[in-house]
Image (cartoon, grey):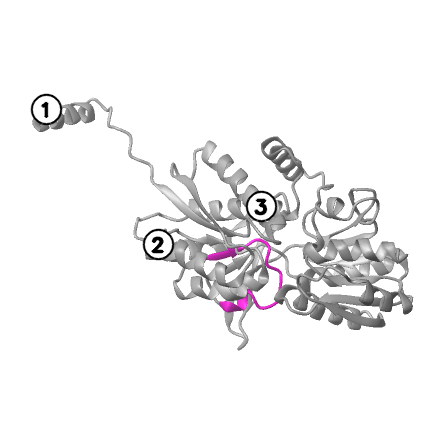
Amino acid sequence: MQFKTKKLLAALIVAGVAPAAHAADIKLGVAEALSGGAAQYGVSIRNGFQLAADEINAAGGINGNKIVLVVEDEQGKKEEAINVFKKLIFKDNVLMVFGPTLSNSAQAADPIAQAAKTVAFGTSNTADGITSIGNYVFRNSVTEADVLPATISTVKAKTGLKNVAVLYGNDDVFTKSGYDNFKKALEDQKIPVTTTETFAKGDVDFKAQLTKIKGTNPDAIVLSALLAEGAPIMVQARQLGINVPVIGGNGMNSVKIFDLAPGGASNNLWIGSPWSIENKAPENVKFIDAYKAKFNGSPDQFAAQSYDAMYIVAQALKNTKISGELAKDRAALRDALPAVTWTGATGAFKFRQATDRAGKPAGYDADQAPIVSVTKDGKYVIEK
């Protein structure tokens, strides 16, 4: 039987009908918060990855190889993010890892990837210092340091604000980083702060802080918060008659704000981001239509950034010869990523190298210009 099989194979090759080579799967890890408070970001992020991977595979994959996503729930917790990274890198043997969802978790888990010489690619981490961890750490989420000054200057130009009150979460890497960048931007633009108030994760009653803020009569509230606290802050502020603009960071940029702060409570929220659902660029319209068709709902910034991230990695993979030797392939992908440019749902994109605390080259940040939008009656409206 074995002899006949060999003869048949030889005959096929002579006839020019060689059997097709078996395409290899390219396993990419996805570590996102699919449960818990951060799931309102993590589920959208997973959806963006899945949509892009399905499109890429339908178009022939990566040089004939199929992308396979290995998805794990890191629950928005630092300890769980570390565990998930270890599983994906050392047990599942993925080529790289996308995630985690929160900057807090990235600060804890990304060093695992760096030590294992495996790319960690964040699509929603905007706090300072993430990419200083090392040269295997990438992100296409624009930092708060890049976005917040532009947001504040736009609000100042449009509303004429002369002072602000500041409210921020003081127990989270992202919200504290947002506060630091807000503080610097306000100082640089010479905008006085009437009062600075804080809250913690899990708080549900913000009336004491908001009452103090109301007493200082600010022209706007600068808010560094995630949606879980940020949405009720907006609801309670409006209930107290505080109807001034709210200037938010990356954590407040989601269409879910309209569900969590209904009845006009979400109005007058100002956000800066490279992505807007109102951007009519053809790449963005294509993404929005495909997302709605697949998931029966509107995408947000987090879905758009993960969608683009998958295509950015796909471009790098197309220029990477997959050898089947994991360590070699992980290094090759890392080497190919910095040169990638891409125009997708979030617009024109390229990487900018970051430095570590000693000033030496480290990982890679997004180099993109933000779009500033304001919420009006359940929609984000681009301010020009």
Sooner in the amino-acid sequence: mark 3 or mark 2: 3
| 189 lies left or right of 132 | right
- The relative height of residue 19 versus residue 192 in the rendered view (above or below) is above
> Is residue 220 visible to the viewer in this orientation of the structure?
yes
Residue under label 2, please give it: 91
* Circle 1 or circle 3, nearest the eye: 3
**Residue type, mark 3 in image:** Val
> Is residue 348 visible to the viewer in this orientation of the structure?
no
Q: What kind of element bears circle 2?
A: helix
| 320 lies left or right of 128 | left
* Circle 1 or circle 2, nearest the eye: 2
Q: Residue at x 75, y 60 (%)?
A: 150
State whether the magenta stretch is mostly helix, strand or loop: loop
Sooner in the amino-acid sequence: mark 1 or mark 2: 1
**Residue type, mark 1 in image:** Lys
Residue under label 3, please give it: 43
Q: Residue at x 83, y 42 (%)?
A: 377
Q: Residue at x 33, y 57 (%)?
A: 327
**Residue type, mark 2 in image:** Lys
| Residue 299 colored in magenta in the image | no
Q: Which quadrant of the view contains residue 294?
A: top right
Residue 340, x across and y down, in percent = 51, 51
Sooner in the amino-acid sequence: mark 1 or mark 3: 1
Q: Are marks 3 and 2 in contact (CB under 8 Å)?
A: no
Residue 178, x across and y down, in percent = 69, 65
Residue 73, x across and y down, in percent = 50, 51
Q: What kind of element bears circle 3?
A: helix
Relative depth, front residue between 190 and 116: 116
Q: Are marks 1 and 2 in contact (CB under 8 Å)?
A: no
* Separation of residues labelled 1 and 2 (CA atoms): 40 Å
Residue furthest to the front:
205
